[in-house]
Amino acid sequence: MTATLQLETRLLSEELRALLQRIDPIGWRDGREAEARDRVDRIRSRLRVVAAVAIAAEGDAESASDSDAERWLRGLITAFERAPVAEGEQPPRQAWAAFVREIQPAYESLVDWLRGRNVVVPAVRPTNVTRSLFHLASALTSLALLRLLPERWMVVAVSGSITAWAWSMEALRRKSPALNRRLMRFFGPVAHAHEHTQVNSSTWYVTALLLLAAFAPRLAAELGVVVLGIADPLAGIVGRRFGRTRIRAGRSLEGSLTFVAVGMLASLVVAWAFHPLTLGPMLLVAAVAAVVGAVAEVLSTRLDDNFTIPVAVATAVTLAGAVSGIPLR
């Protein structure tokens, strides 16, 4: 890949990220259409530049044979040909939300392509309320599993069976495009675009749940699942809606502070409801769970945060309990 193509592609990714952040459905405001159309026009111009540079670089064997680059470039050009450029039958919010869904897969392919060339750019994921509710339901189901099964081996057996099924499906859908299409149609409302071709977040989550069931004290495991299932989606919603101070990889200070506040509240509720702890120990484990979870979320750019957050929270709470003598079972 030539230096010029790399530069132009990185600039394209930055403009696309800015557009996706501005037209996210949960942050939509009346009067944003004119700004959004201006950004679309600028990105169309940038796409023409990138396409021209890519054609000029055809002598470069890497650039010429890069089918991944052709895929995201073709996808973006096609999507931007259908961008909402005038008032149509759909209300503005719905029209731009449909546009987000169309360009998101191509943008994530672009991000992955750049990362494969050591150009790190943050992904931008649109608000998905259905996915957030799925997060919450998964957390409550996992909490019930941890609370209701009386023996650790039972929790390990159930979570291990689910994990084995999930990884089996990951392997099978790579061998069978037809199976992958059927699975993605079923999970489409809660799946991110990149999960059509990569290990999905639910698989990483059940893998983390198996590790927690096998090794973590009960309270540590419970806090791991509730911090992920409640604090993470709410932090994402607040960050997209109100985030102004960017700190790392597209995360915002406002979102991270929401993560800490919600994570601590959820942890306190769980500790108070199910464990005979006094106020001081409850505050300590809740604070550790919330802060470590927020840090793990910010740092999770290579690994899926559905794995890193519960594992990091459970590990930190376990260490805090061991150091301070707090019973966690």
Image (cartoon, rainbow, N blue to C red):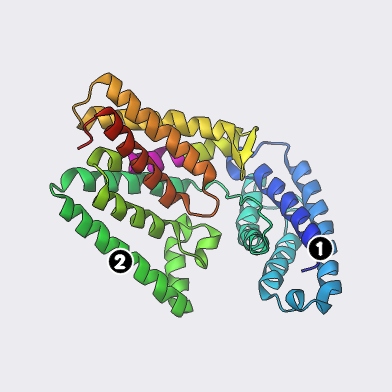
Q: Quadrant of the N terminus?
A: bottom right
**Which tag is nearer the camera, tag 2 or tag 1?**
1
Q: Residues within 10 Å of mark 2 (few under 14, many from 20)?
A: some
Q: Is residue 132 left or right of residue 31?
A: left
Q: What amino acid is found at the position of numbered circle 2 in the picture?
A: Ala
Q: What amino acid is found at the position of numbered circle 1 in the picture?
A: Ala
Q: Give 275 or 15, whichever is nearer the viewer.
A: 275
Q: How many marks?
A: 2
Disc 2/disc 1 C-alpha distance (Å) = 44 Å
Residue found 24% across the figure and 29% down from its top: 325
**In the rendered image, which residue does mark 2 sit on?**
164
**In the rendered image, which residue does mark 1 sit on?**
3
Instruction: Assign the magenta stretch its main secondary structure.
Output: helix
Q: Which residues are magenta?
A: 223-232
Element at label 2: helix
Element at label 1: helix
Q: Is residue 208 left or right of residue 55?
A: left
Report the residue that reaches farthest toward the top.
279
